[in-house]
Image: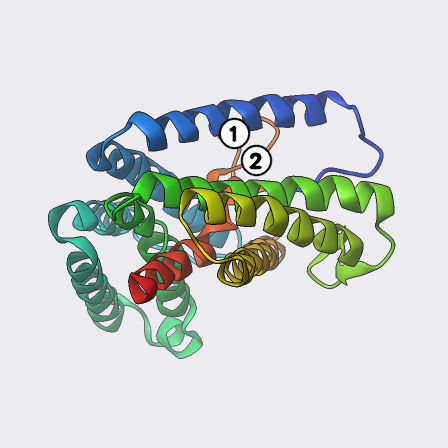
Amino acid sequence: MSEVSPTTWWSSNLIQRLLSGVMMMLVAILSLVYGTTQWVGLLVLVVVILGMQEYRAMLSKQNVFLNQRGWLYSAFLLSISPLLGGIGALNAMLILVVGGWILNEMVFSSKQRLEELHSLGWALFGLFWVGWSFPHMTLIKDLPHGELNLCLLLVVIVLTDSLAYFGGRRFGKTSLAPGISPKKTREGSFCGTVGSMLVGSVIAVNWLEFSWPMALLLTFLISVLGQVGDLVESKMKRLCGVKDSGKVLPGHGGILDRLDSFLLTTPFFYYWILLLA
């Protein structure tokens, strides 16, 4: 999630951020409520391709170059595999893609680059972090009550982000992770976590028939993991020396800036549902 300077409370950037955020929320809700699993899978395909391209572009700032054609093929194959065979197909495709990247690096990379593990290590991280994690959205959609589960995930993540932002603006004093993202505060994190837990738990109890203890635990873990995913992406941007992962979303930066909180929470949420089903 991209950050906004404390001096720009009602700046044009913030207004642009809110407007584009509302539009994305409407598209997401309409897709979840009225869209088929195939339609959600198509959106996931677009998001994964854009996100992995942003990841590749960020790495290029530090002279770590991934083969563009191979990277696009990897994004495409990982994205469509849940539509072809569910979780088994996704995990099998991940193994094939990872094996392909390892083989490619061992055969074609220079000895120095292999010793430094630059391209190989970052490629494997990106395949898991973006390419494997986000297609779980398609898998969740295909489960019983999939649209309700995705709505719950969406509400908790969005509320955590929004309440943490405005709570931090109002009450923030103590930095949450000064070495990674100095503008994020513990007070803002607390507001985001508590607020999203309360609203998310009401949805989980009334829509999905969760017990209150289970709903509170689930929404707490989603909120915390979402913030961890946010910090991971912030660390990635610091390592690459960039402010935003991209420019495709007005006021938000790139796809990864907006969806970083889903990269850890989506697989976690899917396996949580499977364990409790």
Residue nearer the viewer, 171 or 76: 171
In the displayed image of the protein, which residue is found farthest to the left? 84
Q: Position of residue 136 (x, y in %)?
A: 31, 52
Q: Give the residue type at disc 2.
A: Gly
- What colour scheme governs how the chains and residues are painted in the rendered image of this protein? rainbow
Q: Position of residue 64 (x, y in %)?
A: 44, 58
Reading the image, the residue beneath label 1 is 249
Q: Quadrant of the C terminus?
A: bottom left
* Residue 33 visible from this viewpoint: yes
Residue nearer the viewer, 261 or 277: 277
Is residue 147 left or right of 160 when viewed as pictured?
left
Is residue 179 left or right of 215 when viewed as pictured?
right
Task: Relative to 171, say whether 94 is above or below.
Answer: below
Q: Give the residue type at disc 1.
A: Leu
Task: Relative to 114, say whether 175 is above or below.
Answer: above
- How many marks the image carries: the answer is 2
Q: Quadrant of the N terminus?
A: top right
Reading the image, the residue beneath label 2 is 253
Q: Residue at 18% of width from left, 59% of height from top?
A: 93
* Residue 1 visible from this viewpoint: no
Is residue 91 left or right of 203 when viewed as pictured?
left
Image quarter of residue 19: top right
Label disc, if present, on residue 262 of the rendered structure: none
Circle 1 crowding by C-alpha within 10 Å: few under 14, some 14–19, many from 20: some
Residue nearer the viewer, 112 or 46: 46
Task: Relative to 155, say whether 232 is above or below.
Answer: below
Task: Relative to 251, say whether 202 is above or below.
Answer: below
Mark 2 vs 1: CB contact within 8 A:
yes
Q: Position of residue 31 (x, y in %)?
A: 34, 29
